[in-house]
Image: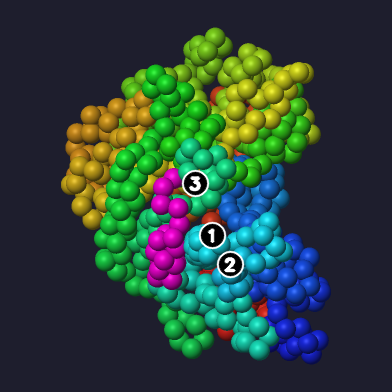
Amino acid sequence: MTTKKNIFKHMKSKNIKILAISFIIGFFTSCNYLDVSDELAGGITDISQVFNNVDRTKKWYSQVFDNVPDYSRMWATPGMGNIWAFYADELYSRIANNSGKYSEWNSSNTESTRWYTLYESIRQANIFLERVKPIIDEGGPDAARLTETEVDRYKANVRFMRALYYYYLMEQFGPVPIITESKSLADELDVPRNSLDEVINFIDSELLEAMDSMEPEPYHSNESFRAVPTKGVAMAVRAKLWVYAASKLFNGGFTEALQVTNKDGKQLFPEFDQTKVTKAKDVCKEFIDYANEGNRYTLYHSIGDDPALSVYELFQVYNPEIIWATAKNQWGSLGAQNFDTMTTPRSEPSGLGGIHVLQELVDAFYTADGYPIVATSFLPKSSTYVESGFGTHDGFEVSNMYINREPRFYNTITFSGKKWHISGKEVQFYYMGNSDKRVPDGAPLTGYLLYKRLNRTVHGNTPGVTSKFRPSIIFRLADFYLLYAEALNEVSPSDPDVLKYVNLVRERAGLPDLEVLNPSIAGDQILQREAIRRERQIELATEGQRYFDVRRWMIAENAPGQGGQGGDFTGMNPDGNKVTFHTRKKLHTRSFKRKNYLYPIPLVEMQRSEVLVQNPGW
């Protein structure tokens, strides 16, 4: 077996001194997770050429941000995009189907792994932290400068990004190796996994150190810096980190993982620890208090407080609900193989209709009165919901399934009978309709398309608006209201803040408070827990959170429609006419085994290493 050590011994014989330089010369393969890519190296031949030059230093700094999440990137499978909505009980696409992740798969399938790209970015960050310095005497009095104050801010932001990348590795793999130095060829390069507690505590300490020197206030009004992380962003990541640490998956609930040890016997996954649950509540509260102080972050409400407009406009412009968003995005333009084209039905110009919504998500949304369409443990079934027959919505005849649903339903789902913006045409997914299955690609496999985050001025008319910028949101306040409610409920279920923060999210969507609909829910930990989980499913639908939520809660083994990620998933009947179309039909069967609670370390890395151990079941 070829090991990393053997590879590096060969490299050393070439007198290569620095890993970044070895990449430039082209000796390393892209599979080495401690390397830096050619793109990140930037064409230099000596590392000093970077950090003795202001422009190159700033370029290196900017490239540390290259792997921030982009949740608009849905028509592709990279792990820092939003393929996760398709791997969860939310969406289906042929891109996701072709990845092999709907059936049982093994560790040789590296589709959507974050292992390589994030370790490349971590190494990029390590090099920057080791080598960046003020540059004040380059090229004369008019030359560019890099002051000590700027360097301190850059280092804080890079330290944050390194911690963030470790957070996203932890989210996917659990315990991972912590690398904080740019290794030379004289160093030991086959590195074992740190324990999960070590990873969590490392990320936490790095965030705390970084936030002291990060911008203390949001960049809401500064368009040039909105993509730059601030103290509030670091506090938000810290809240998510400790909610993960307290959740069942990482807090003693994954029994198979408790048996995983390094080859020296070191246990990687911890037993249950109640203090982590309290810690999660406290850290979430710290962020909520920071957000509330001076209204640093607030839930977005439209002018006139129209719930339908509020849940739409939230995603269209920068606003105070957004904690962090990236300026880069892949909404694309109509005709390109990206989000806007794939969420537009084929009945509209340039529409390809490739992002299909599962019935399991459609059924999760409440009716306009705030009740579910099927009775749950915490709320009875809505008396207004019926599935038989037709009614009128927005001027067109539609199934009663789609009548009197909540605003988030209409903002998220394109259903048969929906009136399309701009053209005003009816979308018809049933057989012989204008967007039916009689096409080689883009058939309405579930009878629904994703509508959420599409801009309603985008249309293929000529002339017309074929593309529209909007932020690709990474973190927003509603997520953290619900995280705080979740953490608080596990510690103090009788605290009125549990329902307060859930209800704030519901109220923005035009729904009554939970305790108004069911007074017995107040203070009942189990009922509140289920209500919070349903609220996260609806409010954050297709934003890249559901895949990880059901895993950290360890409910992914449930039946479809109850958090389950394996089994038969459904949609409407694309073979049916306008009437028979509206019956549930199996789309396909997905596999979920307990090993799928975590991703495997890529097989090639396991084969190269003498010290790495694999996640359970792989």
- The CA span between labels 3 and 2 is 28 Å
Badge 2 crowding class, 10 Å Cα cut-off, few under 14, some 14 to 19, many 20 or more, is: some
Badge 1 crowding class, 10 Å Cα cut-off, few under 14, some 14 to 19, many 20 or more, is: few
Callout 2 amino acid? Pro
- The CA span between labels 2 and 1 is 8 Å
52, 349: nearer the viewer? 52
Which dot marks residue 134? Answer: 2
Q: To which quarter of the image does residue 445 belong?
A: top right
**Sequence-first tag of 1 and 3:** 1
Q: What residue is shown at x 29% (from left), y 48% (from top)? A: 289
Relative horizontal placement of residue 541, taking residue 144 as reference (left or right): left
Q: Nearer the viewer, mark 1 or mark 3?
A: 1
432, 253: nearer the viewer? 253
Span colored in magenta = 200-218
Callout 3 amino acid? Trp
Q: Residue furthest front?
A: 141
Residue 131 at least partly seen: yes
